[in-house]
Amino acid sequence: MGECALWGGRIFGLVAPGYAMAKVAAAHIVGDKSERFIGADMSTKLKLMGVDVASIGDAHGNTPGSQSYAYNDDVSQVYKRLVVSDDGKKLLGAVLVGDAEAYGGLLQMMLNSIDLPENPEALILPVLDGEAVPGLGVDSLPDSAVICSCYEVTKGQLQAAVEGGATDMAMIKAETQASTGCGGCAALTKQVVDAELANLGYEVKTDICEHFAYSRKELADIIRVTKIKTFDELLDSHGTGHGCEICKPTAGSILASYWNEYVLKDEHIALQDTNDIYLGNMQKDGTYSVVPRVAGGEITPEKLIVLGEVAKEFDLYTKVTGGQRIDLFGAQLHELPLIWKKLVDAGFETGHAYGKSVRTVKSCVGSTWCRYGVDDSVGLAIEIEDRYKGLRSPHKLKFAVSGCTRECAEAQSKDVGIIATENGWNLYVCGNGGMRPRHTDLLAKDLDKETLIKYIDRFLMFYVRTADRLQRTSVWLENLEGGLTYLKQVVIEDSLGLADELEAEMASNIGNYQCEWKTTIESPEKLKRFSHFINSDQPDSSLAYVVERDQRRPARPEERNDNQIETVELVD
Amino acid sequence: MNWTTVCKQEDLTSGTGLCALHNYEQVAIFYCGRTESLYAISNYDPIGNAYVLSRGLMGSVGEEPVMISPLYKQRYNLETGVCLDDEETKIKTYDVRIENGEVQLAA
């Protein structure tokens, strides 16, 4: 993004003035000479080397007679400064470093000459527990207030878009372009949109789909309180139609969280999505990957050899996962029971890699071997993985245990992270890697093992009870009213009086655990489904593979059409 | 019309599909126990490019009975084969019936 011209000997170096110049230039090219560039507001919010910085209006206090307020926190690396008019009534400018949350509100205050509150310093001082956040309600802004300065979108335009049917941020962005430039106005735009939705009497709909007029949380309450055991019962008593890809897996997950019955039972099988229904992870060509549980990432050489032998026998592409397990790819439907028979006989269990459920508890080697280890992280990881294995939940759950503060297991990026200290275990929650990484928050520290497990029980069942469908713990916490403070009250102080109930629900779930693959290979009736055709023993003839780095992988379309390339003979 | 038996009625599980090899074609057969309806469509997912449709979920959109591709979740009308998420995409449908406890496809 560059400038169209050197205007008044100045270089702006910002998106908004650039767009404004481009607009004028384009008008002149098509013959409209009435448009003029008359300078631009230099306010901006950026991230510089990972630090939020923002500058508004007269940030340097160049206005004669202006006064300023400043707040400096060396510890948290935050600096904020307000520049106000000589009479102290109007905001002229501001500088924010390290924390630019207040940018949107302050910018509007400056642009619209809104009167400062009686104690302007409150606008930049940290907010302490219980204090109201100072700032300005979007209602106080005039309709002409420019909310998005990159695309010059006003409050009035946003309101018109909402009235015109743009009722969520995606539609607002498409309709008005607001917050599609630098994104600095996203929070404020959302506030304006939400306020307008409320003004128009919109109710924010939380129905999970057309078949149930309930949120996931409400469905979980219904199933738990009325002890509904099947989807058909739920549909007959609370729904309409025949269900869909949203409500069926959601109900299947809730039923499994509370009653933990075999997921392929006749009354549950139709609820299971792509992966659960064949207890494997479907790959792009319709074959499956196989992931046995390797609790804590600890495995004997004998068992490792079994995995290697099975992979060799069925010619499975083999890869080590991020959760300290081994993933075997390319198994066809009819091969799954044969593979699992060998694995179960060798002492393996299903790893639930196909489920929205507890996956792995990763661990470092801990005090047993490590020169720095403070406690036995592997032992605790195995114990925890055995306790919660297979727990079905609103989304997948990943754990880790580190034996000291060096944190080699990366526990602070997991849904549940545990780190050994000199005085016990620290419990961290609601972290995430993936699409939007989030570090965990410390829930409680220096716990003995009994208390640690009690807290994890409560935490997990509270998440199961209240989260939205496919909502990871990180996003759940961010949306939980009262946030971490509230979560601590519920889990540690038992503020809702639910602790016993949550622990009992977990105990019941654990009591009903079974290895789904063991149950399946022992059921001749269930095994009938593990065949590509109901009326033939032939495999799917469309599968084709090529060898790459000494293993097979699915052939790409261009490789399939080229008869010159020899594809791999499949093991039958 | 000539009918070919591909499996037994007892092989059907309500709310799920299965795949039959029929005249060298892969056919996905779906059974809804709630309405006692039987449907047959091609097993080939034209968007995911794999023979997997028999392994998808069943459901309804308004009054339309649908199945959902297990790969990328497009919905297909089980009666017409039309993709609800991409109207240009339509998959083949087959005549199917239950006769004397046997599931049959039209030749």
Image (spheres, grey):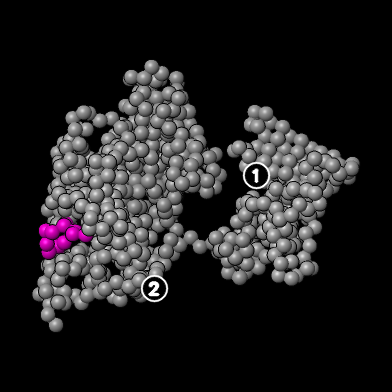
Q: Which residue sits at x=29%, y=64%? A: B45
Instruction: Report if residue A48 lies within the magenta region.
Output: no
Label 1 is found on which chain of the structure? A
Q: Which residue is mark 2?
A: B87
Q: Which residue sits at x=39%, y=73%? A: B87
Q: Is residue B19 visible?
A: yes
Q: Which quarter of the picture shows residue A94?
A: top right
Mark 1 nearby-residue class (10 Å; few <14, some 14–19, many ≥20) = some
Q: Where does the image place residue A298, in percent across and percent down from the top left? A: 28, 30
Q: Is residue A494 visible?
A: no
- Tag 2's secondary structure? loop
Q: Which residue is mark 1?
A: A46
Q: Is residue A36 left or right of residue A211?
A: right
Q: Where does the image place residue B61, in percent across and percent down from the top left? A: 37, 70
Q: Amino acid at mark 1?
A: Leu
Work out whether disc 1 and disc 2 sit on a shared chain. no
Q: Amino acid at mark 2?
A: Glu
Q: Is residue A422 left or right of residue A194?
A: left
| Secondary structure, magenta segment, majority class | loop
Q: Which quarter of the picture shows residue A317?
A: top left
Q: Where does the image place residue A66, in percent across and percent down from the top left? A: 86, 42
Q: Which residue sits at x=20%, y=46%? A: A517
Q: Which quarter of the picture shows residue B26?
A: bottom left
- Check the image and name the residue furthest to the front: A564
